[in-house]
Image (cartoon, rainbow, N blue to C red):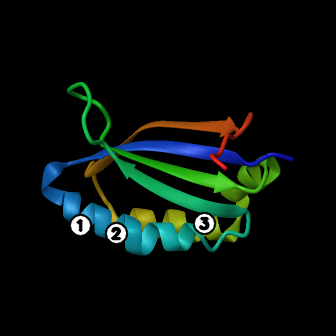
Amino acid sequence: MSHVVNVIFVDCLPEIEQKYNEWYNKIHIPMIMKYDGVLKTTRYQLLKGPEGQTRYMTVYEFKSQKAMDSFPESAVFADVDKELHTSWKGPEFTVKTAAQYEMMKAWEKE
């Protein structure tokens, strides 16, 4: 069974960027990592690209499709969702795209 990933692209208002990144790194990700089915989470920020390109990308790697599909029904997800809606009340950030992918093959240098 291969790993699957959930990829999220997010933009936030420039004036809350520092607060958003601190919250994401110190609160949001550690809460999600409590879910047994999550193997790894990696965040990226845009270096350069066309104007309007989404600034942040997060890749959540799950053990399996079943683990990813079960996450929304988990107690961890309920806690994450409650905290998210407590910390953020308005349009400070926007999820631009979210998609799930299954690994086909990986190459590594020897």
Q: Secondary structure at mark 1?
A: helix
Dot 2 amino acid type: Trp
Q: Earlier in the sequence, mark 1 or mark 3?
A: 1
Q: CA distance from mark 2 to mark 3?
A: 18 Å
Residue toward you, 71 or 54: 54
Which one is closest to the eye, mark 2 or mark 3? 2
- Tell me which residue sits at (63%, 74%) in the image: 34
The residue type indicated by label 1 comes to Lys
Residue identified by numbered label 1 = 19
Q: Residue furthest left?
A: 15
Horizontal side of 51 relative to 28 (left or right) equals left
Labelled pair 1, 2 in contact (Cβ < 8 Å): yes
Where residue 68 appears, as percent x and y from the top left, is 72, 51
59 to 16, vertically: above or below: above
Label 1, label 3: how far apart the Cα atoms are: 23 Å
Q: Is residue 95 left or right of residue 73?
A: left
Residue at 73 percent across and 69 percent down: it is 36
User: What is the crowding at mark 1: few (fewer than 14 residues within 10 Å), some, or many (at least 20)?
Assistant: few
Q: Which sits in the foreground, 26 or 1?
A: 1
- The residue singled out by tag 3 in the image is 78
Q: Secondary structure at mark 3?
A: helix
